[in-house]
Amino acid sequence: MNKIISLISGVIFGFGLTVSSMTNPAKVLGFLDLFGQWDPSLIFVMIGAIVVSSPFFFLTRNKTKPLFAQSFSIPEVKTIDTKLIIGSSMFGVGWGSAGLCPGPAISSLALLNNYSLAFIVSMFLGFLLAKVFN
Amino acid sequence: MNIVNFTPFAAFTGGVIIGLAVVLFFIGNGRLAGVSGIASNFLTSKINRTDNFLFLIGLIIGPIIFSIFVNNEIPFLITDSFTSIIFAGLLVGIGTKVSGGCTSGHGICGIGRFSLRSIIATITFILTGIVTVSFFG
């Protein structure tokens, strides 16, 4: 059952990214162009997603088990350190250069374009290179 | 600052749909739908590899369903050179791995859980993203 949940969650997530046009790098760069031609849409995507999910995180806080798995996997790291700041900054620079982040990049593979593919291959390489920083 | 191309209704609706996916993945499988984590774990870890693979395949199926049932035209506009796309991909890969999350993991799931770590990460990548676009966009 959890395999089906994984697939359906991914499909719904990808559908939502498309509805909100987050699969379009130009749309994302519009959000980051605060001092130019600003498109505030992305913040509404985040608000919509947080408004829906936040109550469920709160309601399940005392539950020990999800429906189809043995336990909840929630990150235990709570530290705010230089790795968090440096990593997020590197991500921000990459995000602002291409207008692509991991979710939309993978979804936009559906549009069969070489840019998304090149981005994903180098992102995967980046995941491996991150060991050097850790 | 000029406000252009603003589509609050479509953005909010898409966000709500993404939120439903986050809820399903969490109450069903007990996991957070952070795409950088799912993608990097798929690459480097045997744990939940099939689940991670299915989620990533689902991400690609989503737009296909949209194009069949809603609108055939899904805009995708990129003006960068191939070289800068590769540079951007490397930074996104290293950065999300080092900081433990991206727009979905920190920006949606983390903020939804009121994680201070994720709130700080999100502010940092939005600010550095804005700086990057302002100076190099």
Image: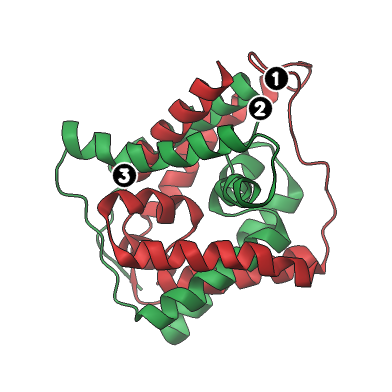
Chain colours: A red, B green
Q: Are marks 2 and 3 in contact (CB under 8 Å)?
A: no
Q: Taking A41 as reference, is A83 left or right?
A: right
- Which residue corresponds to the image point at 67% horizontal and 51% vertical from the top-left? B44
Looking at the rendered structure, the secondary structure element under dot 3 is: helix
Residue type at numbered disc 2: Phe
Q: x, y (%) of residue A57?
A: 66, 27
Q: Do labels 2 and 3 share a chain?
A: yes
Q: Are marks 2 and 1 on the same chain?
A: yes
Q: Mark 2 points at which residue?
A: A57
B123 left or right of A84 in image? left
The answer to whether B41 is drawn above or below residue B91 in the figure is above
Drawn side of residue A84 relative to residue A29, left or right: right
The quarter in which the N terminus of chain A is drawn is: top right
Give the answer, above or below, for where A100 lies relative to B49.
Answer: below
**What residue is pinned by disc 3?**
A18
Count numbered badges in the picture: 3
Label 2 – label 1 distance at C-alpha: 5 Å
Residue found at x 39% / y 62%: A117
Residue type of the residue flagged with mark 1: Thr
**Marks 2 & 1, CB-CB < 8 Å contact:** yes
Instruction: Name the quadrant of the C terminus of chain A.
Output: bottom right
Q: Which chain carries label 2?
A: A
Distance from disc 2 to disc 3, alpha carbons, whole Å, reads: 25 Å
Q: Quadrant of the rendered structure where residue B123 is?
A: bottom right
Q: What residue type is labelled 3?
A: Thr
Q: In percent of the image, x 43 and y 62: which residue is there?
A: A100
Residue designated by label 1:
A60
| Chain to which mark 1 belongs | A
- Assess disc 1: are there few (<14), some (14-19) or many (≥20) residues with their C-alpha within 10 Å of its C-alpha: some
